[in-house]
Amino acid sequence: MNKLKQRATIKDVALAAGVSPMTVSNVLNGRMQYVGVATRKRVEHEIERLNYRRSTTARNLRVAEQRSIGMVIVDESPAFLADFFTCQVVAGLTNVLNVADYTLTLQGVPMASLARSMIVRNYEVAGFCAMISGPSTERNGVIQLLAGLEQPLIVFQEELAGPSTDICTVRQDDRGGGRLIGDHLLARKVRRPVMIVPMQHWPAVENRVAGVRDAIATSGSEAELTIVHANSESFADVQAAMAGYLDSHPMPDAVIGANDQIAVAAMLLLNERGVKVPDQARVIGFNGFESHRYSQPHLTTVLSPAYSMGECAGRAMLHRLKTGAFARKDEVLPVVFENGVTT
Amino acid sequence: MNKLKQRATIKDVALAAGVSPMTVSNVLNGRMQYVGVATRKRVEHEIERLNYRRSTTARNLRVAEQRSIGMVIVDESPAFLADFFTCQVVAGLTNVLNVADYTLTLQGVPMASLARSMIVRNYEVAGFCAMISGPSTERNGVIQLLAGLEQPLIVFQEELAGPSTDICTVRQDDRGGGRLIGDHLLARKVRRPVMIVPMQHWPAVENRVAGVRDAIATSGSEAELTIVHANSESFADVQAAMAGYLDSHPMPDAVIGANDQIAVAAMLLLNERGVKVPDQARVIGFNGFESHRYSQPHLTTVLSPAYSMGECAGRAMLHRLKTGAFARKDEVLPVVFENGVTT
DNA sequence: CTGTTAGCGCCTTCAC
DNA sequence: GTGAAGGCGCTAACAG
């Protein structure tokens, strides 16, 4: 079925109230200057009685306007949204949009099928927000593809090189966060820190690494950062990479996870091997969320403003829609250092 | 702005390809029996060249059909979605819908403004899924309101009493989970278990309590379950409630949290007071997620099938849309016991 | 295989 | 203040 069953239209309401459809429309749109009070009452009463609901579809067609923003999540995994970071971003975004009577249209697409997806083939939202994962080249391909749609576009956690039209990036200050971590460790005389990062190229991660290096360079310390690549950020891969490193190198005096999960996986391995944290090795993560209060031991980390990023994107998009242009091409949100007991 | 700017229509494509709009429409809809190969090629080429994208709005109006499902999250907190459970449900739901070329339209609404919201006033999706929080009476009010919309409705984590039309509930087997917990604790000779629950009435929580009681009754054990009410499920409130209880009662031999956060908050308090877990008191949670692998100590809990619930709801809705009726009025998904080190 | 006609529900424009 | 005509972009039904 999935059909529009017998549903009251403006015409029905008009008929019942003994007025013309135009008058009903005026009432619906709050153009009260054009409608007598008595008429309005009658119309409103009939709307209620007939359980009338305006067809968004017909209205949007007529006024050539969309009241929804598309949130595109490009990821191979079908569980794309089941990620706390993305989740927070979507939450913030939805809230800002909803308050402005916009809707969020969620679409998860595997990279391969994006070109044939409804998003690309159909015109149905006023603009797009995108969270893209995958290798760098492919991510850029996706951005090109979405940009080709010639609609306002916001991309999360990316940095764009060339001049771009009608694209805005929203990201957190990963490099600044890296610096905070570096400063914190250097103040504790760390000399041989190791940072575990996933194999996959990811600008946020590179910025975190760069931030740590900034801190070392600025301090004039002779500390040296070693990068250890894990095949993925899964629990098993991280532990394997960490084990491989420990087996063939002297014990590092600090382990930095590219994110909290990585840090915890590494820390659990250290525990297993009898290494005392933080006495023998300090451990620090990245992208902590509310849940950090519940973790035991309390991991030192850098708090992600993911929810605010969503809000920021929402506001940016609404502004773009209203004024015709983004206020800024790149929105960078500050992160906050969170002191735990693991450093 | 937010206007449809100069955008190619079917007419433009038809003109450019030298055919009628109807032929273009046939190509778009894959009705190739009605279109010659040469013509099709020409049309497809022009679609590409003109960067044509079909207007979902116009199509939906014409065929009187919506290709989107509304996900309504009724909650006072603007951070509604920033909750792992909801997040997982939405992820599962979106995936199933997207594969069927349906879209998910997300809308978060505070209870108070629901009646005046776009959801209620406008007709724009084929059906609704709802996650409602708040006191029992108000939740029922929301369900009534949404049911009054006369569209297919799926509600998560509720049990409906009376006969309902076109409503389906999707929930996890909380009572079964409670039984698993009860059995586990009884097998360990627990006699004075305490269960910490939030003040707010919540059917899922009541079912968990009932399940534990079931287990006790079935076993014929003389164990007795004490319920401790916390003002909310926040860290502070849970610890306050727990402290209040401990100060005026003998030490329980097991603490059951109505969910994992509650359990962990309680456990941290026990730690602070020097109570050894699990030797002096066992601790057990509810609604574990992937993150349980990262928690330390590894909490014993019952794993929530939240993601599957989303998938289940998606399938149920698609079936309803296709056949005109829900296959089942109440979908109950099994939970899985997860053995940790805290029991 | 291709084209013509008509209309989905709403709102802009203009007349009364 | 209110109403009548017309059309947004698309496709069902029917002609050819």
Image: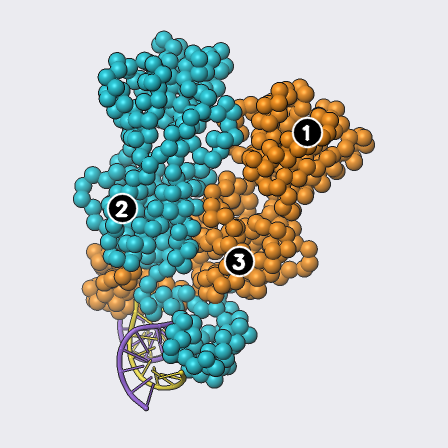
Chain colours: A orange, B cyan, C yellow, D purple
Residue B293 is marked as none
Mark 1 belongs to which amino acid? Leu
Residue at 68% over, 55% down: A161
- The answer to whether any part of residue A84 appears in the image is yes
Q: Is residue B179 above or below residue B18?
A: above
Q: Secondary structure at mark 2?
A: strand
As measured in the structure, the alpha-carbon distance from the residue carrying label 2 to the one carrying label 3 is: 34 Å
The residue pinned by badge 3 equals: A112
The residue pinned by badge 2 equals: B168
Q: Locate residue A181, reporting x and y percent.
A: 67, 32
Q: Chain of mark 3?
A: A
Residue at 25% over, 51% down: B326
Choose between A330 and B252: the one closer to the eye.
B252
The residue pinned by badge 1 equals: A246
Q: Is residue C4 left or right of residue A166?
A: left
Q: Locate residue A316, reporting x and y percent.
A: 55, 52
Q: Locate residue C16, reporting x and y percent.
A: 29, 78
